[in-house]
Image (tube, rainbow, N blue to C red):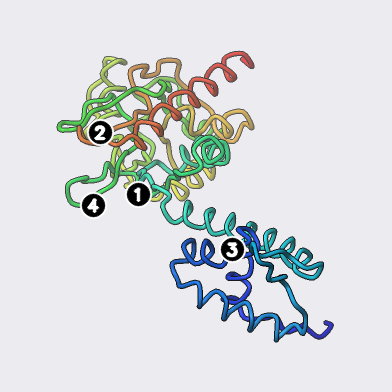
Amino acid sequence: MGKKTRLPPLNALRAFESAANHLSFSRAAEELCVTAAAIGYQVRLLERDLGAALFLRQPRGLALTREGRALQSVCHQAFGEIGEVVDTIKIGSRQQRIRVASLPHFSARVLFPGRDAFLERFPQLDFEVDHTLALPRFSEEGGDFAIPFGTGNWPGLESELLFNSPVAPACSPRLLERFALEEPADLKQVPILLDDNAFHEMWIDWFRINELGGWEKLNYVNCNDIHALLSSAVAGYGVILEPRFMIEDLLASGALVMPFAKSLGNYGYYLAYPTTTLANSACRAFRDWLQERVQALVASRDAAE
């Protein structure tokens, strides 16, 4: 790197730039909230430091010398660019952040891929995501929104349906061959990989639509790590009951299959929130954006099918 040129003091440059813009020490003093004598002192320091006169002192006011005009031009540009960066930093520091508790697969497929578009549309807003399989306790943990999967009935919270996703048992082809799952009653002989934070009620509902009892006697294996649960299902260690939206890639690849025709159609992804959340304009903007985003995704998926 080349040797850096020593710059004059910033206060002197700022005083000069203001005086050059106004061609007046007194008006520069008003702008910078100092005295005219202080402006004159800083300008003289700068001229001495540069070894060149920057102003011509005339009877009717000031005029810039050739050196003064050259310095004014670069000072005006430099201070302007500094001001723009400072404004950007200040806006960023005032950025409102919206807290969302989301299912991991939903944020990976809906929230994060859409974040750049959200920031472009709302530069003073941002959202942060807490991954959870359980509905948060807003009164204790704070936060603005949650995106749970269910039927939309969460006492004390408002909920808006984002989209429905059918739910039916799924397993690996090797487990299907091993246990010869031909009818729903055959599930009583295989391990059920259960997300123990939710979905117990879904098994009850699924057995009900198949007019079967005995759900309480199923061989449940609790697991609250969704990645471990899916890996275990693909490896053939048990049957899962998850939203089709979450496992559609595994179904498409053949890693998982759905052995039974009937599915629950009354479950879906919801936006849930305390009644006070939408009093905040930033939260309203996020809600509207998310509704638009999922509508576009659903329309695109329907068109592809």
- At a point 42% along the width and 28% down the height, the residue shown is 169
Could you say where residue 131 lies in the image, as x and y percent from the top left? 39, 48
Cα separation between marks 4 and 3: 58 Å
Sequence-wise, the earlier of marks 1 and 4 is: 4
Residue 224: image tag: 1
Cα separation between marks 3 and 2: 50 Å
- At a point 41% along the width and 47% down the height, the residue shown is 129
Q: Say which of marks 4 and 2 sits in front.
A: 2
Q: Pick the quarter of the image with the C terminus.
A: top right
Q: Residue pushed farthest right?
A: 2
Sequence-wise, the earlier of marks 4 and 3 is: 3
- Vertical order, 154 against 265 (above or below): below
Q: Residue pushed farthest front?
A: 59
Q: Which residue in the protein does label 4 denote?
A: 141
Find numbered disc 1 in the image and state the secondary structure of the residue it sits on.
loop
Cα separation between marks 1 and 4: 20 Å
Mark 2 crowdedness (10 Å alpha carbons): few <14, some 14-19, many ≥20? few
Cα separation between marks 1 and 2: 34 Å
Q: Which residue in the protein does label 2 denote?
A: 279
Residue in front for this viewpoint, 196 or 186: 196
Q: Pick the quarter of the image with the N terminus.
A: bottom right
Q: Amino acid at mark 3?
A: Ser
- Vertical order, 33 against 202 (above or below): below
Q: Say which of marks 3 and 1 sits in front.
A: 3
Q: Say which of marks 4 and 3 sits in front.
A: 3
Mark 3 crowdedness (10 Å alpha carbons): few <14, some 14-19, many ≥20? some
Residue 241 in sight from this viewpoint: no
Residue contact at pointers 4 and 2, CB within 8 angstroms:
no
Sequence-wise, the earlier of marks 3 and 2 is: 3
Sequence-wise, the earlier of marks 3 and 1 is: 3
Q: Which residue in the protein does label 3 denote?
A: 24
